[in-house]
Image: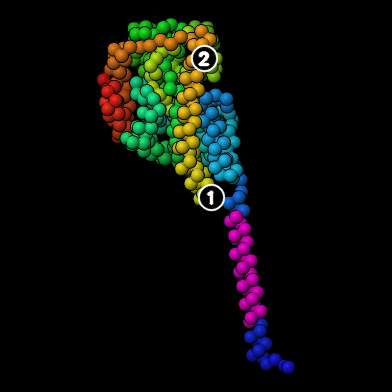
Amino acid sequence: MDLSRRDLMKKAGMVAAGAGFAGLSLSMANKAIGAEEAQQKVIHWKLQASYPVGTAVTMHAVEWAKHMEKLTNGRLKIDIFPPGAMCAVNDIVNYLQRGVFDCSLTYGGFYTGLIPESDLEIGLPQSWQSYDEIWDAMTNRGLGDVIREAYGEKNIMWYTGAADCFYHFNTNFPVTKLSDLKGKKIRALGIYGKYVQALGCSVVVVPGAEMYMAMKLGTIDGAIYGATGLMDVKLHEVVKYYTHPTAAQIAISLLINKDALKKLPDDLRNIVQEGSTYVLHDSSMKYITMCKASMAEAERLGSTKRTYLPEEELVKMRKLVAPLWDELAAKSPRMKKGVEILKKQMRDLHRPMG
């Protein structure tokens, strides 16, 4: 039977509509496949380390990279580069904020000239004596918000974790009273350089890699350094005494470029943002255990002995150090807020400054 012109046009329209629907469906399917492929794509981040792989500090980066890969089912892999691979340690913040690499595990004391608030994060002399005190200051008292805001202005997301729980004088002479330190040549960095000066020492700037020989040759009489270094870099061979209690429980920093975070798929970004804090809590406990084990092993070998400052000497020390805290507070309103948080915490812990 012959078809009318109207019937032919109707059928043609149906064919065209069917083709259009098929095209739309194919387009939607392709987009879905593309989205799925994007979700499954393996993303590689570059992490610039500040300390050699194998040291306690870089253990944080190794643990974080391992857990991020596991939590993302292998979709985010973090490649760790040794110190100096992409930039000098002192330049990490400048390069990171520009996105030359994606993240770094480092020590805030390197960047106090660029970010004054980094002095607050590392552990001021005669402040925290344990990791729970860091957590209390950062989480309960708002210090973390102060530091996070400062790094945020550099396009950087900041996280913290514990470093050495023993961070004090490594010396070739015993320290049981402050007068023992008078005139001694001590290697120290940043705020800790001013700390040893306040205690009557001479500050000597020696790169970490040269500290062993400086101690061995008598170029320095001691150094402010973490107890993990006793075994990490074999300082126990040249350090006869280690002073307790710690000048502070010190902290390290995980820094992430904010643009790198924004580029991640939503689910991966949430994992990194929410999971990093808890991974660092876990690695912090591991670090503290390593620090105590290093101190104990140096003692067991008979090469390094502990010495202790009594409470009356610590009271004197806090009075001598208090002006350093005030000097930091005078740098800016934000620094003043951070120092006041720490002072209040110390008063609450019955260790007032001054």
Residue furthest to the right = 1
Return the x and y of residue 8 as percentages of the image width and height.
Answer: 67, 87
Question: Can residue 257 be seen in the rendering of this structure?
Answer: yes
Do the residues under discs 2 and 1 have CB atoms within 8 angstroms?
no
Q: Quadrant of residue 157?
A: top left
25 in magenta: yes
Return the x and y of residue 146 as percentages of the image width and height.
Answer: 35, 36
Q: Quadrant of residue 144?
A: top left
The part of the chain drawn in magenta is 13-36
208 in magenta: no
Q: Which residue is mark 1?
A: 265
Check the picture and name the quadrant holding the N terminus. bottom right
Return the x and y of residue 220 as percentages of the image width and height.
Answer: 47, 10
Looking at the image, residue 42 sits to the left or right of residue 95; the answer is right
Q: Which mark is residue 297?
A: 2
Q: Residue at x 60, y 43 (%)?
A: 74
**In front of the other: label 2 or label 1?**
2
Label 2, label 1: how many angstroms apart (C-alpha)? 45 Å
